[in-house]
Image (spheres, rainbow, N blue to C red):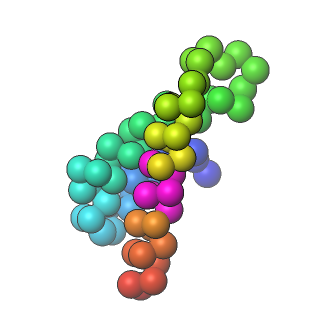
Amino acid sequence: MSHNLKELRKECAGIDSDFNKRRVVEHCVYLDTFWNVKYPDFTISIDASHAKRGINSAKRIQDFVSMKLRQG
């Protein structure tokens, strides 16, 4: 199991090329900057704008994946 969205997106793109769309890639790349926030030595400071952008990216990826799952 991985929390690396770059790796997960590439795996999904091997099945469905829509995962290579620019916006999907951009959201995954941005969200990958937050994976280490759960660790005590996390050094990046996150302000409100970064948090809002991260939440927006997460929602967009969630919506995209949900739509793909509904399509079967």
Whether the magenta-drawn stretch holds residue 25 is answered as no
Instruction: Pinpoint residue 62: horizontal percent, then vertical percent.
Output: 50, 62
Q: Is residue 46 left or right of residue 71?
A: right
Image quadrant where one finds the C terminus: bottom left
Residue closest to the eye, 68 or 51 = 51
Looking at the image, residue 13 lies above or below residue 35 = below
Magenta stretch: helix, strand or loop mostly: helix
Q: Does residue 4 appear in the picture of this structure? A: no
Residue visible at 59% across and 18% down?
45
Looking at the image, residue 18 lies above or below residue 52 = below
Residue visible at 39% across and 84% down?
71
Instruction: Pinpoint residue 37: horizontal percent, then vertical percent.
Output: 65, 29
Q: Does residue 5 appear in the picture of this structure? A: yes
Residue closest to the eye, 62 or 20 = 62
Q: Is residue 3 left or right of residue 25?
A: right
Give the magenta range.
57-62
Residue visible at 32% across and 47% down?
25
